[in-house]
Image (cartoon, helix red, strand yellow):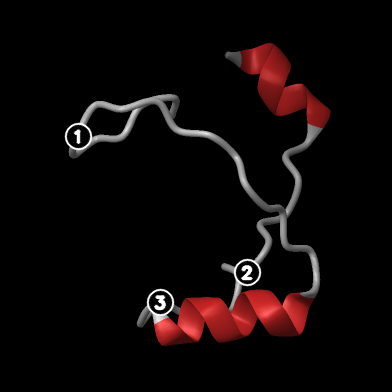
C-alpha cells in the first residue's frame, strides 16, 4: 500500500517494531488478536508439479 485508502495521500514508513511484547500490546489496544495464525504444513514438492 503506497497511498492512504481514506485520503489518498502518500504513506511513509515511520517505524518497524520487532519486539513481540510491544507488537502484542499494540494489537491488543487496537482490538486485534495479538496471536499470529497457526502455521500451515508445507506442501509436498510433487503438488506443485501436478498443477
Q: Quadrant of residue 41?
A: bottom right
Viewer-nearest residue: 36 or 1: 1
Give the side of residue 18 with respect to residue 9, left or right. Answer: right
Between disc 1 and disc 3, whose residue precedes? 1
Viewer-nearest residue: 27 or 36: 27
User: Quick one: SS at disc 2?
Assistant: loop
The x and y percentages for residue 25 are 58, 86
Residue corresponding to mark 1: 7
Q: Which mark is residue 32?
A: 3
The x and y percentages for residue 10 are 40, 25
Q: Quadrant of residue 49?
A: top right
Question: Marks 2 and 3, Cα distance to the nearest angstrom?
Answer: 16 Å
Viewer-nearest residue: 45 or 16: 16
User: Quick one: SS at disc 3?
Assistant: loop
The x and y percentages for residue 16 are 71, 53
Viewer-nearest residue: 6 or 46: 6
Between disc 1 and disc 2, whose residue precedes? 1
**Rendered position, 16 above or below 4:** below
Give the side of residue 34 with respect to residue 46, left or right. Answer: left
Residue corresponding to mark 2: 38
The x and y percentages for residue 9 are 31, 27
* Residue at 61% over, 81% down: 24
Badge 1 vs badge 3, beta-carbon distance below 8 Å = no
Q: In the picture, which quadrant includes the N terminus?
A: top left
The reply to whether residue 34 is in sight is: no
Amino acid at each position: 500500500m503506497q497511498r492512504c485508502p481514506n485520503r489518498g495521500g502518500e504513506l511513509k514508513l515511520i517505524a518497524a517494531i520487532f519486539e513481540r511484547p510491544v507488537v502484542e500490546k499494540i494489537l491488543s489496544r487496537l482490538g486485534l488478536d495479538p496471536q499470529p495464525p497457526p502455521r500451515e504444513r508445507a506442501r509436498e514438492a510433487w503438488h506443485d508439479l501436478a498443477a
